[in-house]
Image (cartoon, rainbow, N blue to C red):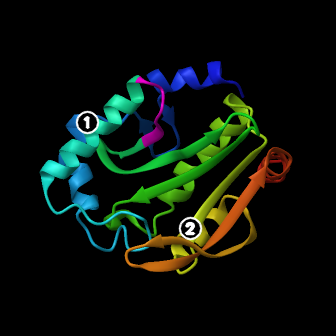
Amino acid sequence: MDKETLRLFTRIPTLKTARLVLRKISATDLEDCYEYSSDPEVPKYLLWYPHTERSFTRYYLGYVERKYRRGEFYDWGIELDGKMIGTVGFTSLDVNNNAGEVGYVLNRRFWGLGIATEALNEVLRFGFEILSLERIYAKFIIQNEKSREVLCRCGMREEGVHRHAIFSKNKYHDISVYAITRAEWLENRIADSPS
């Protein structure tokens, strides 16, 4: 992956799965975004606090649109039946080492339906096939068992725990790191394909 490849995020492509559309986030997503961002359970194990005002969500969406224009934002909105129910994508891309960190957030009304797994699998495909990444990884607060389950279902493996790696919400947190390499992803695709 080179810096030129990253320019595609200035016009982030729309991706589709069996149930989902992964597409650019926009100001028109205000109500849907506020719905899950204001739920205290959604960011419980994330680094941000629940949105208490729609004005903050509006500001955030404006920030996202500015970052898209500069090709500095690598997240997709997760759309199900016309409703934006969360986001998924790359929290960072390391051009020098051909690696990307992924993350996701989902409206609590849609937990337990396999949506995060479906969306993340599509982002992994995009990362390995389109961006030609060598390694994709995720970091999460170790108490976040739901996130661990998503990563495992996507074929990612635990690499280790970084103790007291993040100070957030007035305390230190241990962070677990999961990853998958290009070779592992290809091997999983071969194993999952019908004979």
**Above or below, 173 relative to 55:** below
Q: Residue visible at 32% across and 31% down? A: 65
Q: Which numbered tag is attached to residue 62?
A: 1
Q: Is residue 138 above or below residue 65?
A: below
Residue 141 left/right relative to 161: left
Amino acid beneath label 2: Phe
Q: Quadrant of residue 157?
A: bottom right
Tell me the amino acid under the disc marked 1.
Gly
Q: Which mark is residue 140?
A: 2
Cα distance between the residues tagged 2 and 1:
26 Å
In which quadrant is the N terminus drawn? top right
Q: Quadrant of residue 153?
A: bottom right
Label 2: element kind = strand
Q: Badge 2: few (under 14), some or many (20 or more) residues near its Cα, within 10 Å?
A: many
Q: So how many labels did they put on this image? A: 2
Q: Where is residue 114 shown, x and y percent of the image?
A: 51, 62
Q: Is residue 32 magenta?
A: no
Instruction: Please tell me whether mark 1 sits on a helix, a strand or a loop.
Output: helix
| Position of residue 30 measured from the top left corner of the image (x, y, whole percent) | 20, 44
Where does the magenta region start and end?
A: 70-76
